[in-house]
Image: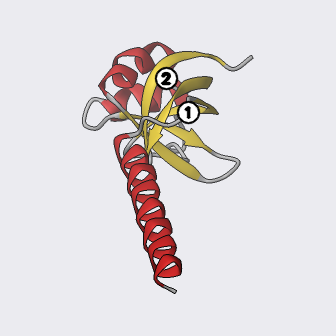
Amino acid sequence: MKTRWIQILVMTLILSVSMTALAQKAKTGKGREKTLVGFISDSSCGLQHMAGMDDESCTLMCAKNGKFVLADRARKIVYDLDQNGQQRAREFAGKEVKIKGRLAGKTNRVTSIEAAS
């Protein structure tokens, strides 16, 4: 009986440590690198740009007062880009891209950006 309780205690401890490690990994964004496809947009417009302006012009104008984001129009999700992503995104303003990086919540820690096609 005593041995059974020790086994349960040890298993509970192992499970607790494992869950803590997984939570910490997710929190720090050190998970697997992912590739996301979407459009480089700005934080003001997100998924849809102003009428009468092409996507590139609108993105560049609005990003002056905000920041660049990745807009996944198919899934209707907007991802923030880290500082590295902000620097690389300007040349792809309004264009469809593939971004490789690690997600931490809805922020992508960008390792590369390239044209989608």
Q: Is residue 13 left or right of residue 53?
A: left
Q: CA distance from mark 2 to mark 1?
A: 26 Å
Question: Of helix, strand and loop, which one carries label 2?
Answer: loop
Question: In the rendering, at what x and y percent does residue 85 appear?
Answer: 40, 23
Disc 2 marks a residue whose amino acid type is Ala
Q: Earlier in the sequence, mark 2 or mark 1?
A: 1
Q: Is residue 90 left or right of residue 73?
A: left
Disc 1 marks a residue whose amino acid type is Arg
Task: Say if 7 sits above or below 68 in the image.
Answer: below
Q: Nearer the viewer, residue 16 or 116?
A: 16
Question: In the rendering, at what x and y percent does residue 66 appear?
Answer: 28, 38
On the rendered image, what quadrant is the C terminus found in? top right
| Residue at the spot 44% in from the left edge and 20% down from the top edge | 89
Task: Say if 62 sits above or below 23 in the image.
Answer: above
Say whether residue 95 is visible.
Answer: no
| Residue at the spot 48% in from the left edge and 33% down from the top edge | 102
Task: Say if 9 sits above or below 60 in the image.
Answer: below
Q: Nearer the viewer, residue 82 or 15?
A: 15
Residue receiving disc 2: 93
Q: Residue 87, labelled with which disc?
A: none
Say whether residue 111 is visible.
Answer: yes
| Residue at the spot 46% in from the left edge and 70% down from the top edge | 12
Q: Is residue 63 left or right of residue 50?
A: left
Residue receiving disc 1: 32
Question: Of helix, strand and loop, which one carries label 1?
Answer: loop
Way the structure is coloured = secondary structure
Neighbour tally class for label 1: few under 14, some 14-19, many 20 plus, Cα within 10 Å: few
Task: Say if 4 sits above or below 69 in the image.
Answer: below
Q: Nearer the viewer, residue 17 or 29?
A: 17
Question: In the rendering, at what x and y percent does residue 106 appear?
Answer: 44, 48
| Residue at the spot 64% in from the left edge and 46% down from the top edge | 73
Question: In the rendering, at what x and y percent does residue 56 appear?
Answer: 51, 24
